[in-house]
Image: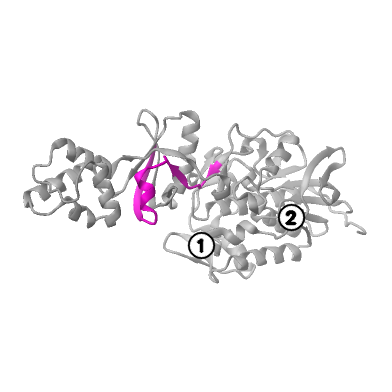
Amino acid sequence: MSDADLAIVGAGAAGLMAAIQAGRAAPGARIVALDGARTLGAKILVAGGGRCNVTHHQVGPDDFAGSTRPAIAKVLRELPVPATVGFFRELGVELKREATGKLFPVTDRARTVLDALVGAARAAGVELRFPFRVVGIERRASGFRLQGDRGELGARRVVLAAGGQALPKSGSDGAGVALARSLGHEPTAAIFPALVPLLVSPGHWLASLAGVAVPARVEVRSATGKGLALFRGDLLCTHFGLSGPVVLDASRHFLAARLEEPRSRFVVALLPGATPESLEAEIAALGRRGSRTLGGWLAGKLPDRLAEALLAHAGLEASATAVRLARGSRRALIETLTALEIPIAGDRGFAHAEATAGGIPLDQVRLATMESRRCPGLHLCGELLDVDGRIGGFNFQWAWASGAVAGRGAARALTIPRHGGG
């Protein structure tokens, strides 16, 4: 392979955006995007159930964890949501907003998004090479030398967009962090799954409720009971434990808390609109009416199977009434409905995670260009960085924004003599 002006390592969401922006900003440069996968864009194709949740209608730094909010905000401002919508419209991909605020292509096909990105990269003069797995990058006086499983390539500048570790079958297996480390970067002390389903302790009664889905409120608490993070959304019981949007959002914060304090707590309110006080009054009124059972009352609020299981957990029969309900039993029932502590045994790992928590901190790059502060000529973007968003298109928006900044920054830094030959 002949040398390039710019090599982009990784042609996923962030890498393709970097390639497009670099190609448009430096039309005379030779830009090569390398990816180890046999088929490009596996994560794009599976996102949103195969529809690709391109972004969210409103994105801000508070939707993310990892690096500092001001640093995240600075990058997001370089490609706000309206600009993202306009970018895809220019590529022929119209987006529609759903009730959740998520933006999907009107075709409801992720392939529409991927084909548009690949087509735009090629139209911008980018050469896409895959499968080409980069296994090493060496910094030299003239730039970089990339070693791959199919040869070597010299490049004046490099954009590293090799992803995190979520969904490793797509090619995101942590190699990007290893490459960044070899060039002087220090990742966070912990790198762990984000947006990942959680496992309950073996034999826990929730595992018998697979398929039950309800709105819920989930709170991550410290061992002493201090609230650390709070989320609302749909919860899904599964044969292994818990999933659903609210659990995925909370998972990152719970796993991070548990790294600091193994006794951190995962607390669920299965009647998210109720308070202990409102339930106390409701149960008292139920007792005055006398005849209605607790099972009948709770079945009006929750799926039957879940209602019965919650009553049993509180030590009550579904046929019991609120008449002369002991104070301790009433308290146990209210706590079960509003602050059920669930023993989390673990998570389903990177193979089932939608994002990666941890990575290269943003204070190791120059935010205006995403250029490394430790290795001049190297730019970093996407999931490789210590930024992860909640569910709903936020991680894609980070990929688009950080990829755009890295691509433009790399292109501006190039003098652009036209490459001859090869």
Q: Residue at x 66, y 35 (%)?
A: 364
- Is residue 17 inside the magenta stretch? no
Q: Which mark is residue 292?
A: none
Select label 1 or label 2 by which is in front: 1
Q: Residue at x 45, y 59 (%)?
A: 101
Graded by Cα atoms within 10 Å as few (under 14), some (14 to 19) or many (20 or more), the crowding at tag 1 reads many
Per the image, label 2 sits on a secondary structure element best described as helix
Q: Which residue is mark 2?
A: 22
- Where does residue 391 sit, x and y in percent of width and height? 49, 52
Q: Quadrant of residue 86?
A: bottom right
Type of amino acid under label 1: Leu
Give the CA distance from mark 1 to mark 2. 25 Å
- Name the residue nearer the viewer: 101 or 369: 101
- Where does residue 155 sit, x and y in percent of width and height? 83, 47
Q: Which residue is mark 1?
A: 103
Q: Which residues are magenta?
A: 193-220
How many labels sit on residues?
A: 2
* Residue 17 in the image: above or below residue 93: above
- Name the residue nearer the viewer: 315 or 420: 315
Graded by Cα atoms within 10 Å as few (under 14), some (14 to 19) or many (20 or more), the crowding at tag 2 reads many
In the picture as drawn, the residue positioned furthest to the front comes out as 203
Q: Quadrant of residue 177?
A: top right
Q: Are marks 1 and 2 in contact (CB under 8 Å)?
A: no
In the picture as drawn, the residue positioned furthest to the right comes out as 421
- Name the residue nearer the viewer: 333 or 260: 333
- Is residue 219 inside the magenta stretch? yes
- Position of the C terminus, as image quadrant, is bottom right
The figure's colour scheme reads one colour
